[in-house]
């Protein structure tokens, strides 16, 4: 099925006119660079496709031309790349997102440094930058878009001028990246994580349907950290303010993450919805930790999405896959509208439809009984009632910042304890995307030991006067 012009059976396909065109022009170009149209088919995410997903469509090209062929399809592993060449499917591997995640991918393969490759996770946060006209960000590579603006080299980072020790508390994406980059700078790093595994939200989210590759955010960083003798890592090590004051490590980075709020407050509902307590409410965090069994009652589950990105739809998918009857309610006009920026929206909505999830758009919450939920149309205010044994509100997150508050309450004791700085990073500072947490951790490590000016713009800006006098005047 295709609603786009020229796509699908009514358009240009690899079995029909697409093949005819390439056969007709077979020897004309010096090289064939082949890929799928449109962009949402070309840059498919790992949630919806495997590595090499374009092969079925482009593998015929080599058989109709003697010219070299290059293609794409989120090739992130050297083994897959070697297979494609050995099987004669292509002569070159194109790698757009894999190169964004790791611009030094080819060098690392050449040098046999396979474990050093920072593999793309296929999340398309990079495309969201393009689609929202803001600087590009990458969930794996925090230096993307800052190479020129901030002088952040993807591989190199200046050695620290101080030899002070740093304690990083929390082993999620921000903590892991901060510790890794601090260790790369030669600092003495200690990492403490309260839980039994590294990765924090990345580990929990990677267990959701279709998100397994996201664990690479954790795996690459843990793997790199293990190569540094100046990094010590401790699991199952919850720390209190008292512990930290006793250790007396001079610099503390608090990366304790965030949690989903359960009171309904978010983009649509500005005040806590007390009526939610009339029935069973299950937090997204409970589903992330315990899966579908976190819902303690039988009957229909309603997932209310005020987050508008991936979390709500993967939770609905999780529950539906366990045989739960799921209703998806959103104040928006479509399911997960922010997924348009990651080119996934149509696939997300289609998947929920395929899973028989009931979708109710343009409605917010209005009131509740033990087994019903009243919804209100966001345009007319007209209400309707639906069956609801359990509600999962996916609205907004709050920082897990109690340790920060306990420590700052004892600021007077810092000097005697030898503590010079305490800094919040990642979701503990501002809950956001995994890419933002990773960026925040990296930024902390990059700027460690420097005193950023409060007044200066913290990155280079294009010089419009120079642009006018060179580019527009034709001298460049
Ligand atoms: C952030 C981003 C920007 C892109 N911009 C362009 C573009 O301007 N022109 C183009 O032909 N393809 C563009 N692409 C598509 C890629 O060149 C490539 O065909 C696609 O991502 C599939 O390759 P991959 O699986 O190796 O990422 C872009 C892809 C990404 C992720
Ligand atoms: S943002 Fe995600 S998809 Fe894009 S290059 Fe980075 S890891 Fe890959």
Image: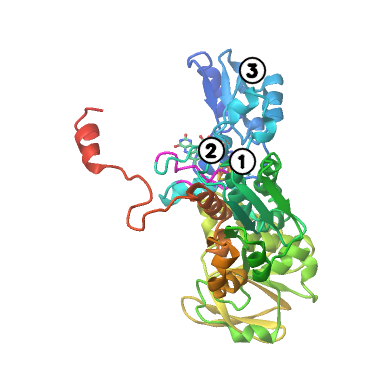
Q: Does dot 3 land on a helix, a strand or a loop?
A: helix
Q: Position of residue 70 (x, y in %)?
A: 57, 24
Mark 1 sits on what residue?
120
Quadrant including the C terminus: top left
Q: Position of residue 389 (x, y in %)?
A: 74, 78
Whether the residue under disc 1 has CB within 8 Å of ligand 2? yes
Can residue 238 be seen at all in this image of the molecule? yes
Task: Give the mark nearest the N terminus, 2 or 3.
Answer: 3
Mark 2 sits on what residue?
100
Please provide the residue range marked out in magenta.
136-148
Kindly indicate the quadrant of the structure image that contains residue 298. bottom right
Which circle marks residue 63 in the picture? 3
Instruction: Please give the count of numbered marks on the rendered protein.
Output: 3
Q: Position of residue 247 (x, y in %)?
A: 66, 62
Whether the residue under disc 2 has CB within 8 Å of ligand 2? yes
Kindly indicate the quadrant of the structure image that contains residue 246. bottom right
Q: Are marks 2 and 3 in contact (CB under 8 Å)?
A: no
Task: Give the mark nearest the N terminus, 1 or 2.
Answer: 2
Would you say the magenta stretch is mainly helix, strand or loop?
Answer: loop
């Amino acid at each position: 099925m295709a609603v786009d012009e020229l796509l699908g059976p009514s358009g240009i396909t690899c079995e029909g006119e697409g093949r005819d065109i390439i056969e007709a022009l077979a020897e004309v170009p010096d090289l064939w660079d082949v890929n799928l149209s449109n962009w949402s088919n070309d840059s498919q995410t790992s949630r919806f496709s495997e590595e090499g997903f374009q092969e079925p469509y482009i593998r015929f090209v080599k058989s109709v031309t003697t010219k070299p062929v290059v293609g794409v399809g989120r090739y992130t592993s050297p083994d897959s790349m070697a297979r494609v060449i050995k099987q004669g499917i292509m002569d070159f591997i194109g790698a757009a997102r894999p190169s964004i995640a790791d611009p030094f991918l080819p060098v690392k393969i050449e040098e046999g440094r396979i474990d050093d490759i920072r593999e793309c996770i296929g999340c398309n946060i990079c495309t969201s930058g393009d689609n929202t006209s803001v600087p590009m960000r990458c969930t794996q590579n925090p230096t993307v878009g800052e190479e020129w603006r901030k002088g952040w080299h993807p591989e190199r980072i200046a050695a620290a001028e101080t030899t002070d020790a740093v304690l990083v508390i929390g082993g999620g994406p921000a903590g892991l990246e901060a510790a890794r980059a601090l260790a790369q700078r030669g600092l003495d790093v200690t990492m403490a994580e309260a839980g039994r595994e590294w990765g924090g939200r990345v580990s929990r989210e990677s267990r959701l349907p279709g998100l397994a590759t996201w664990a690479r955010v954790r795996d690459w960083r843990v793997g790199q950290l293990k190569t540094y003798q100046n990094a010590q890592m401790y699991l199952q090590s919850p720390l209190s303010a008292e512990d930290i004051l006793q250790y007396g490590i001079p610099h503390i980075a608090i990366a304790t993450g965030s949690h989903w709020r359960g009171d309904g407050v978010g983009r649509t509902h500005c005040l806590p919805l007390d009526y939610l307590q009339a029935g069973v409410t299950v937090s997204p965090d409970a589903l992330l930790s315990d899966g579908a069994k976190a819902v303690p009652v039988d009957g229909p589950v309603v997932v209310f999405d005020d987050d508008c990105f991936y979390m709500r739809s993967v939770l609905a998918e999780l529950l539906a896959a366990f045989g739960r009857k799921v209703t998806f309610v959103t104040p928006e006009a479509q399911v997960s509208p922010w997924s348009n920026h990651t080119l996934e929206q149509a696939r997300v909505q289609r998947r929920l439809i395929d899973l028989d999830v009931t979708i109710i758009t343009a409605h917010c919450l209005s009131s509740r009984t033990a087994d019903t939920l009243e919804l209100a149309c966001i345009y007319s205010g007209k209400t309707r009632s639906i069956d609801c044994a359990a509600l999962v509100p996916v609205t907004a997150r709050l920082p897990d910042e109690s340790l920060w508050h306990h420590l700052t309450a004892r600021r007077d004791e810092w000097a005697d304890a030898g503590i010079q700085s305490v800094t919040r990073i990642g979701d503990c500072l501002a809950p956001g995307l995994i890419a933002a947490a990773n960026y925040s951790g990296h930024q902390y490590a990059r700027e460690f030991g420097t005193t950023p000016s409060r007044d200066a713009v913290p990155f280079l800006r294009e010089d419009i006067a120079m642009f006018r006098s060179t580019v527009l005047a034709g001298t460049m």
